[in-house]
Structure formats: C-alpha cells, structure tokens
Image (cartoon, helix red, strand yellow):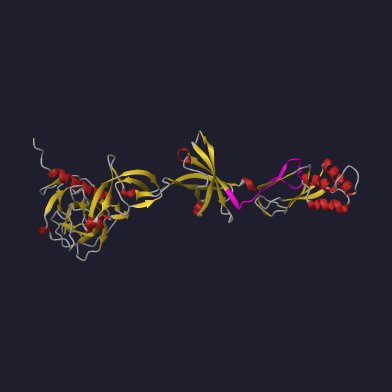
Amino acid sequence: MMTSPILSGCSAEEVPRWEAVNADIPVGKATRLEVRLVGADATAVTVTATRLDMGPDGMAMMDTPLTQVTSEEPGVFAYEANVSMAGRWGLTISGTVAGRPEPVEGIIVFTASEKHSEATPPPGERKIRYYRNPMGLPDVSDVPKQDSMGMDYIPVYEDEAGGSDGSVRISPEKIQRAGVTTAPVQMKVLTRTIRGFGMVAADESRLAMLTARFDGFVEKVFVPVTGGEVKAGAPLVQVWISSVDLLQKQADYLSALKGGGRGGDPARAAANLRAFGFPDVAIATIRDAGAPVRSIVLTADAGGTVIQREAVPGMRFADGEMLFMVADLSAVWITAEIAERDLGDVSVGQNVEIDLPGGDGTVSGTVAFVASMIDPETRTGMIRIDVPNEERRLRVGQLAEVRVAAAVSAEPVLAVPDTALIDDGARRIVLVAKEGGLFEPRPVTTGGHADGFWAVTSGLTAGEQVVVRGNFLIDAESNLTSALVAFTQPAPQP
C-alpha cells in the first residue's frame, strides 16, 4: 500500500475524478507520470492500488511495474515506470478519501512517443516511409492511422528502414532500450554434457581381506571400530589356535629344524605355516622357543580404512571366515547410471566432472568401464569412473551427480549461441549485425547441438556478428519491413 500527501482546496460539489497533469510522456526508462485527484473536499487521500498497462481500453496487454516518487507540487501523485513502446498507456488508480465511504477509481490514459537523439534530424526534415503497428504486429500502413484500441501507428523513417531483403535499421536509442547484444560467429569444437547420478564405492582392486585359515577364538581386537585407519603390517587381531592340524604343522617345523622326522626341509615347513596365515614373527617365536605357540597376532596385508569388521573378542571363528576388510580409499570408484539414449556417446577415457552434494565442490575423474547391458526397467546403463581421492573428499556410499563431456564434432565447426537462432517452424534464421545499426535476417542450416551452441553448416562465415539478445524485437521490425516490400509491390499485369 502506498500513502500520499494531504490534498486540500477541492470543492465538495464536484464528482471526484483522477486526471493527468500531463498526458504526453516519452518512451524510455524511469518515465515520470503525474496525476491528481480533483473534485473531492477531503483532508487526506490514500492511494490503495495502481497499475500501468499498455491496454488502456480494458485489455491489459503489458503490465509494467510502477514506483511512487516524491512530488514537489501539492496534491500531485508522481510515479516512475519503464515505458518500452510508443502508444497509449493506461494508469489504473484507486484511492480512499477521508469522509467518503466509497473509493475513488479511474483510468488515466497517457500517450507515449519516442524521442530522437541529437544526431537524428527533426521529424520535419525526415521522410516517413511507412507506419507500423504500435504492438509489433506485421501490419503496416502508408498513411497515419490507429489500431482497434485507438493507439497511433508509429512512423518509420527512410533512415530507419532496411533493404528489400528484410534488413532493418534500428536507432541507437532502440538498440540500447531493447538490450541488444551481439557475439561473433566462431570456430568451436562442440561438446555436450551427459548427466547421470551415481554412488561412491571402494576400488575393488584396492581391497584387502583378512580371512581366518584355521579354527580358533578371538582374544583381542586392535581396531575396535569400523572406519579406523591402519598401515600395512599393523596388528588387527590376536587369536587363539584351536586347530589340531595347525599344531601338527608347527611340530613338523620344529622337527625339520632338528634335522629329522616328517618335517623335512625347514624352509618348506615354514612356508606351510605362512600358507595358514602365520606371520614371520610367530614363526620366529616357534624357532626361538622350541615349542608350538597357541596365540598369534594377525596383521594387515595393506594399509587403508577398515570398512568391515567381523572380529569380536571371545568370538569363535572357523576356517575361511572373514575377520576384517581394509580398503585403500586414496582412489575410489563411482558407479553411475546413464540414460540409454546417451550411453553410445560415452567411452572409456572420457573426462568426467563430479558435483559433490551440499555444494562441497567438484572433483574430476575418468571413465574406466562402460557396461554392455541396459537395465530393462530404468532404461539406463552403468558406467564406472575412476576418481583420485587423496584428500578423502569422497566417501563410500555417497551420492554424486556426474557430467560427461561428449564430443559432438571431432573438428572445430562454425557455431553460434542458442539465443542467436530464431526458429518459427518454417525457417531458421540469425540476425547479422552490420554497420550503422543495420540488421540482416540470414537463413541458416544447422548441424549438431551442444551445450548452448548450434553448429552452422551454411549461411554464415567466421567473425560475423550475430544478435544473441533482443533478436525477437529486431525480427519483428524485419517482418514489418518485408511486409512493406510486399505492400508496395505493383500488382501483376494481366
């Protein structure tokens, strides 16, 4: 709700009404509109609603934001708005007056016209070529007229019109007001982004499992919790040997050391103990003590993170049972699902960007495997990505979004941004910017599409400037010029 200053000096005999201080306004940004309420003998007025449309005759066609500004003249309400086009604009306003039960409402019509720069000759010295529809419709006239809403057609001067090919010349004021920007046609290797979602997993080639090779009992666990870090050769668990066969192999080793019995060669007997998971420290203890041992410490074959721990003090274990799983997480895998339609563009060796959840940044990886099967339910295929993880930013089980850069063109091709292309179903054109504010609509044929770019196979050359913003306004102007050419063509002779 916007409040206004106190009004006074109005006669109570008049019917209250809103009127414009000056109904003629310029086209442009921050255009000032001033209104007053007459015919009300109120001590205070509060404006409760305002709206500015380019449809003053009851059809709101272009609603424009309105900002109230300070007015130095008593009893005048001042507003600013961006008036983008010439024509009639309707300000709908409603306000309450102290002492009156009903609000005072009204629609005030302002007529907007374009101003010309100092470099542009006055209208009297310029030749009008035609008049165009104020709403941008493809309708022109060789004489002044109004549309169905009473809006005046806008004159187009000779120096603004283009050639017979549909080119159009736009004044600097219009170019600036429409926010027209251009970009060069360039040679570019096109790549498109293929997206998928995956999960972080341990690299299977970096897993080490500690498995019991005899029967026994767990006496002590040196890594009490899952997730602990261990180094290669670090103690994991102390066990009590209950296997008779393993006790016999210790006896054979002792017999071989003494040079007799069924032990044979001491080195071969020691190798038999190692095959059952005996560490060298335990073998040295047997040799030094001259007797079998019942309790030994099992160590980690490789360093890493304990991702699975089954050993519990007092637990009985059997031959072949897993006690610990250790994973080297300095490098991990991401297994991701890719849509069936995109899977053919993914190959081993391609670079992959991985977005970490929670805005935790991005890491890079490489496609290491592409599955040869498609899930019949999800219509996706699996790829595996190798990712370095020295800083441990990726965690096993973590979800991640992956982006694979797939090449659309092996060699650089002519390319224009998406926003440069105008496609109405019957044609594809771009607007080529020439000198002096001239814009030429150029038909083009397109090839492959990549992230934000189209390959152009004909119609353009490298280095030409094409419109990438504001092109639909210029296209409308160009359509009017083409319509004028058809309008002025002489009728064919019978």
Front-most of residues 307 and 468: 468
Residue 303, image x and y in percent? 67, 53
Q: 421 left or right of 143?
A: right
Residue 481 appears in the picture as rendered: yes
Q: Is residue 308 visible?
A: no
Residue farthest left in this picture: 494
Residue 324 belongs to magenta span: yes
Q: Is residue 52 left or right of residue 492?
A: right
367 in the magenta segment: no
- What span is in magenta? 307-332
**Residue 294, percent from left and from top:** 83, 47
Q: Quadrant of the N terminus?
A: bottom left
Instruction: Give the quadrant of residue 449.
Output: top left
Residue shown at the point (39%, 51%) measured from the top left: 188
The picture places residue 182, in percent across and down from the top left corner, at 30, 55
Q: Residue furthest bottom?
A: 72
Given residues 15 and 308, the one toward you in this image is 308
Q: Nearer the viewer, residue 463 or 356?
A: 463
Q: How many marks?
A: 0
- Residue 390 percent across, percent down from the top left: 59, 55
Q: Which residue lies at the image location 34% right of the left edge and 46% below the top edge?
A: 456
Q: Eyeballing the image, is 490 above or below 25?
A: above
Q: Quadrant of the C terminus?
A: top left
Q: Residue at x 29, y 52 (%)?
A: 466
Q: Nearer the viewer, residue 149 or 13?
A: 149
